[in-house]
């Protein structure tokens, strides 16, 4: 029965990681055209996942995940020619945040599907636990 509780932990870690991933996507979408106080364009945020591997868990096939860090993307900024923009440089080019809407939407859908998969694993584990308890009655 204790193994089932560890399985809940693994599913919960997956849901938490995907929730944070979803939060970063939401931040990226919200700041699609934002600038920092310093005047530099907003840099896309990227969560970095890490498997929490322990030998005893690997032997039992359960490895939780955690967010190691949330880093700023080093992808180049988008550049458009808009000489009328007050942020344009001397040649008329404006640097925009390195957030791409299509990539963010795809990442959001992926995060949502991963969250749902972890939730289904959690529900299935709960059902197994309930049926096991019914057998013991």
Image (spheres, rainbow, N blue to C red):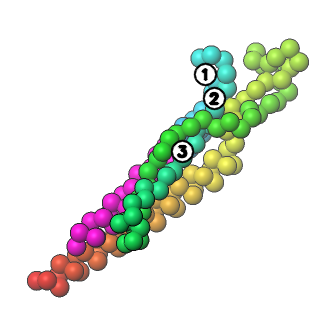
| Residue 124 seen in render | yes
> x, y (%) of residue 9?
33, 60
- Give the alpha-carbon distance from disc 3 to disc 1, as whole Å: 20 Å
- Residue 82 in magenta? no
Q: Quadrant of the C terminus?
A: bottom left
Direction from residue 70 to residue 16 in the image, left or right:
left
Q: Nearer the viewer, mark 2 or mark 3?
A: 3
> x, y (%) of residue 29?
60, 39
Q: Residue at x 75, y 17 (%)?
A: 87
SS label for mark 3: strand
Labels 2 and 1: the sequence-earlier one: 1
Tags 3 and 1 touching, CB below 8 Å:
no
61 above or below 16? below
Q: Residue at x 56, y 37 (%)?
A: 71
User: In terms of image quadrants, where is residue 28?
Assistant: top right
| Label 3: few (<14), some (14–19) or many (≥20) C-alpha neighbours in 10 Å | many
**Which residue is labeled 3 in the image?**
47
Tags 2 and 3 touching, CB below 8 Å:
no
Direction from residue 79 to residue 31 in the image, left or right:
left
Q: Which residues are magenta?
A: 1-23
> x, y (%) of residue 122?
35, 66
| Label 1: few (<14), some (14–19) or many (≥20) C-alpha neighbours in 10 Å | few
Tags 2 and 1 touching, CB below 8 Å:
yes
**In terms of depth relative to the viewer, which is nearer, 67 or 136?**
67
**Which residue is labeled 1 in the image?**
36
**Magenta span: chief secondary structure:** helix
SS label for mark 2: loop
- Give the alpha-carbon distance from disc 2 to disc 3, as whole Å: 16 Å
Q: Residue at x 41, y 67 (%)?
A: 58
- Give the alpha-carbon distance from disc 2 to disc 1, as whole Å: 6 Å
């Amino acid at each position: 029965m204790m193994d089932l509780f560890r399985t809940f932990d693994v599913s919960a870690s997956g849901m938490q990681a995907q929730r944070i991933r979803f939060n970063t996507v939401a931040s990226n979408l919200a700041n699609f055209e934002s600038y920092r106080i310093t005047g530099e364009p907003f840099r896309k945020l990227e969560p970095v996942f890490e498997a929490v591997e322990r030998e005893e868990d690997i032997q039992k096939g359960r490895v939780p995940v955690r967010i190691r860090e949330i880093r700023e993307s080093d992808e180049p900024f988008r550049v458009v020619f808009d000489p009328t923009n007050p942020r344009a440089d001397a040649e008329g080019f404006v640097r925009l945040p390195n957030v791409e809407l299509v990539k963010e939407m795809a990442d959001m859908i992926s995060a949502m599907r991963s969250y749902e998969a972890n939730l289904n694993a959690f529900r299935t584990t709960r059902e197994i636990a309930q049926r096991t308890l019914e057998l013991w009655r």
